[in-house]
Amino acid sequence: MSIQWFPGHMHLTRQAIEARVKDIDVFIELLDARLPGSSANPMLAELTAGRPTVKVLNKQDLADPERTATWLAHYNAQPGTLAFALSANPGIGEKKPIQRLRECCFELAPLRGGMVKPMRVLIGGVPNVGKSTLINSLVGRKTAKTGDEAGVTRHEQRFVLADDFYLYDTPGMLWPRISVPQSGYHLAVSGAVGKNAYDEPEVALEFLNHVAKPYAALLKARYKLTQPVDEVATLSDEQLLEVIAGKVQAVGKGGHVDWQKAAERVITDFRTGALGRITLELPDELAEWRAQAALADEAREAKKMSRKPPKKKTGQRQRVRAAQLREAFHAANPNPAADPEPTGEA
Ligand SMILES: Nc1nc2c(ncn2[C@@H]2O[C@H](COP(=O)(O)OP(=O)(O)OP(=O)(O)O)[C@@H](O)[C@H]2O)c(=O)[nH]1
Ligand SMILES: [Mg+2]
């Protein structure tokens, strides 16, 4: 089952960004460093096309540093793209990249600045990626509301960094159809999707299936698994969740596994970083999933077309209906003189 979440307030956000984008000088696209490709919103890219853009991989403290380097190299090789990794949460990351981000805006829009032409920066991204936290770090105090759940910011808000520098915080936005199923799972496990839009055991199983091989050592360490790392890497998602359940008191007296409890624990451990630094995807992998999703879309479209009933000739339906009525009439009135059909006589 694929994961989709596009509530009404996101539709309004889309409209608000569309209206605002004309008046902005730089767009900061905030990505989650643990899922940089899946957290890139295609609808946002379309809305801000043509604007100088900085891609910021936030929450780098939770991501695998080697994979972050791969993603930065991938993005920085794209023409006209500047990519950074940072931790917006004060006290977690270094201040330097955050200061550099300010300078970057003036590099990208050198004609802006001063009271007449203030710098106007819009920060956008998927829910819970840290947009408001980054605003607070840039402004230097807690001014935007933040929180560890998707959908904290509900309306666009303007913040003043300096007399000639404005920042616009926007509500987190997804897109109406997430066609890459893996991206849906990655967004859900990261906390970008509203709680009611997914099933925790399903998301935890997908997560375990995906990380068991590259991060078997982290799973073993966190849950004190007795199996050697090599064996952990070969366990199926269900086997893994079951052994984890045993380690986190999610197995009842009769041996009944509480899948919900175990799944919630795995998801929380990933989100908080208790499991260690994990990045869920690499650029090549994502390109492959996107290609597969495009093929699946094509196949679905072809199937839909082949299922469409052939168009009936004009009037056929009416003629069939008239014949049915006639039959019913004759059955009820065996006297042929009473035929309801016009005879053609005046
Ligand atoms: N570990 C870590 N946590 C972060 C970082 N940046 C933000 N967070 C946490 O992520 C959560 C979401 O942050 P917000 O700033 O509210 O995210 P947002 O993008 O504004 O979310 P919405 O308004 O819901 O779209 C909060 O609990 C933050 O403390 C970071 O760099 N590292
Ligand atoms: Mg916010």
Image (cartoon, rainbow, N blue to C red):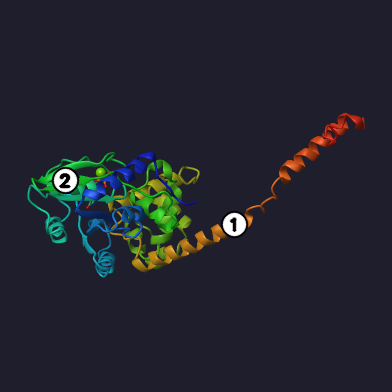
Identify whether 219 is placed above or below 192. below
Label 1: which secondary element: helix
**Residue furthest front as drawn:** 346
Residue drawn at x 69%, y 50% as measured from the top left: 312
Query: Which quadrant holds residue 280?
Result: bottom left
74 or 47, nearer to the observer: 47
Q: Secondary structure at mark 2?
A: helix
Tell me the kind of residue under disc 1: Met
Q: Position of residue 60 (x, y in %)?
A: 23, 58
**How many residues crowd around disc 2 within 10 Å: few (fewer than 14), some, or many (20 or more)?**
many
Q: Is residue 251 left or right of residue 55?
A: right
Amino acid type assigned to the residue bearing label 2 in the image: Asn
Q: Which mark is residue 305?
A: 1
- Position in image of residue 232 (x %, y %): 41, 63
Q: Is mark 2 within 8 Å of ligand 1?
A: yes
Tell me the quadrant of the picture where the C terminus can be found: top right
Residue 145 quadrant: top left
**Front position in the image: 199 or 164:** 164
Q: Which mark, by number, is residue 20?
A: none
Mark 1: is the Cβ under 8 angstroms from ligand 1?
no
Marks 2/1: CA distance? 51 Å
Can residue 110 be spotted in the picture? Answer: yes
Return the residue nearer the eye: 268 or 117: 117
User: Relative to the observer, which residue lies in front, 37 or 329?
Assistant: 329
Residue 211 in the image: x percent, y percent? Answer: 38, 61
Instruction: From the image, state whether disc 2 or disc 1 is nearer to you.
Output: 1
| Circle count | 2
Reading the image, the residue beneath label 2 is 136
Q: Can the viewer see residue 334 in this picture?
A: no
Question: Label 1 near label 2: C-beta < 8 Å?
Answer: no
User: Which quadrant does ligand 2 occupy?
Assistant: top left
